[in-house]
Image (tube, helix red, strand yellow):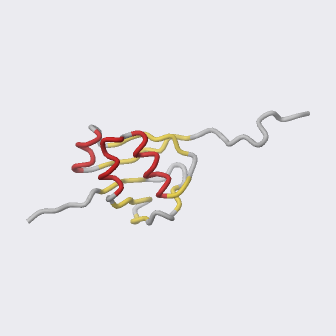
Amino acid sequence: MHDESAGRPGPTATLRVDVFAGLAEAVGARSLALPWSGGRVRDLRAAFAARAPAGADLAARSAVVVNGRHAADDDAVPPGADVAILPPVSGG
């Protein structure tokens, strides 16, 4: 029997990404749902920019937290991870 799905990627899950402060204002929401089957933080930034172009520049300069830990661009973001993007803050 021939399996026609062989070689195709599995279904893509949805990843909830929480955003804060000026980034939430830029995208008009406190969180975004991104199609996600896994990847690196850099891939997450690209997916975020595609979904929310108004927040792309700020997201590129922001910290990404994956499962409670600050993550570098090379770090993995598994499906179902708890993800937040924290923009830089300034104040006096």
Residue drawn at 25 percent across, 60 percent down: 88
Foreground pick, 65 / 25: 25
Q: Is residue 25 left or right of residue 69?
A: left
Picture quadrant where residue 13 is located: top right
Foreground pick, 55 / 35: 55
Q: Is residue 43 left or right of residue 84?
A: right
Picture quadrant where residue 27 is located: top left
Query: With respect to residue 50, does 90 lie above or below?
Result: below
Q: Position of residue 70 (x, y in %)?
A: 39, 65
Residue drawn at 80 percent across, 33 percent down: 4
Foreground pick, 65 / 73: 73
Q: Position of residue 12 (x, y in %)?
A: 58, 40
Residue drawn at 45 percent across, 49 percent down: 46
Q: Residue furthest right?
A: 1
Query: With respect to residue 20, does 11 lie above or below?
Result: above
Q: Position of residue 28 (x, y in %)?
A: 27, 37
